[in-house]
Image (cartoon, helix red, strand yellow):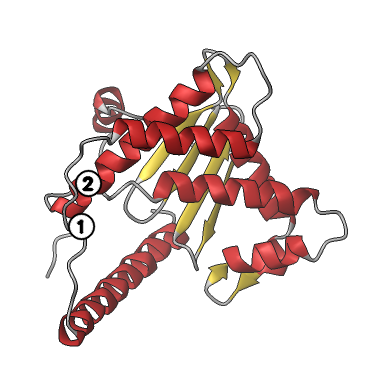
Amino acid sequence: MEKQKKSPSKEQLLRRIQHSPLHLERTKHTDSVYFSDKGLRLTVDDTENYALVGTNFHTHVFTAYTSGGFSRPYLYLANFVTMTLEHEKEITTEDGLSYTRLFEVLKAQEDQTQYNIAKYVDWWLYNIFAPLYEIGEGSASSFLVYETYLHNIARNYITLDEHTEDMTTGMFLAALDAKMRELTEGMPDEVLFAKKTDEERMAEEIEALGDMEADEVARKMEQGKNEKGE
């Protein structure tokens, strides 16, 4: 039989907390929502002053304050969690809270304020999630990481530059394109994605399906732990 693990003593718990690189207290003011259809957990505590954005494989931690004042990520996440809890009954499915259903409910409202805020947060979440796992050993991943880096350099160059005249969205995009061309001038033009046969594409699709199934198993295990309060 498998031996039952002993619960750590008070002294052991204190040592773990003291030596932990990060410790976040869960209080009666902690609000947390988990969207089962997206594998996304958002947690906010307005007394401990932190907000968490997490998937099954990573977690971002935002404090409520920065050197410039209130943290915008914290404020928007707190707002998003609040509106989610307001519509909790409407968006709860057999599998848990539905991210898709939340946006359907918000979009159906006459007042579009909540929907617009939620959509803005959704864009931002996509922007921070999309490049997270681009790093890798292949030539394609290496280029994509570099391209994202150059893109951010170009954006910062334009946004931080002194603006003596109004800049429209069209002017911004034109300046961004020009800056990207300047930064990539002389870059060798190499094959980024090689053409594939039907058999190769099918093999990759099968592998991707396997990865999705593995992710779903991990999600359900995580959901089970959360329901048990582990």
- Residue 206 showing in the rendered view: yes
59 vs 33, nearest the viewer: 59
Residue 167 lies in what quarter of the image?
top right
Left or right relative to 148: residue 114? right
The count of marks equals 2
173 vs 62, nearest the viewer: 173
Farthest residue to the right: give it: 110
At x 46%, y 46%, the residue is: 127
Q: Earlier in the sequence, mark 2 or mark 1?
A: 2
Residue 39 vs 201, above or below: the answer is above
Left or right relative to 65: residue 141? left
At x 63%, y 38%, the residue is: 169
Residue 185 vs 70, above or below: the answer is below
At x 35%, y 37%, the residue is: 181
In the image, residue 228 lies at what x, y percent? 43, 60
In the image, residue 105 lies at what x, y percent? 74, 65
- The answer to whether the residues at label 2 and label 1 have Cβ atoms under 8 Å apart is yes
Residue 206 lies in what quarter of the image?
bottom left
124 vs 4, nearest the viewer: 124
Q: Pointer 2: what residue?
A: 143
Q: Pointer 1: what residue?
A: 192
Mark 2 surroundings: few (<14), some (14-19) or many (≥20) residues within 10 A: some
Q: Amino acid at mark 1?
A: Leu
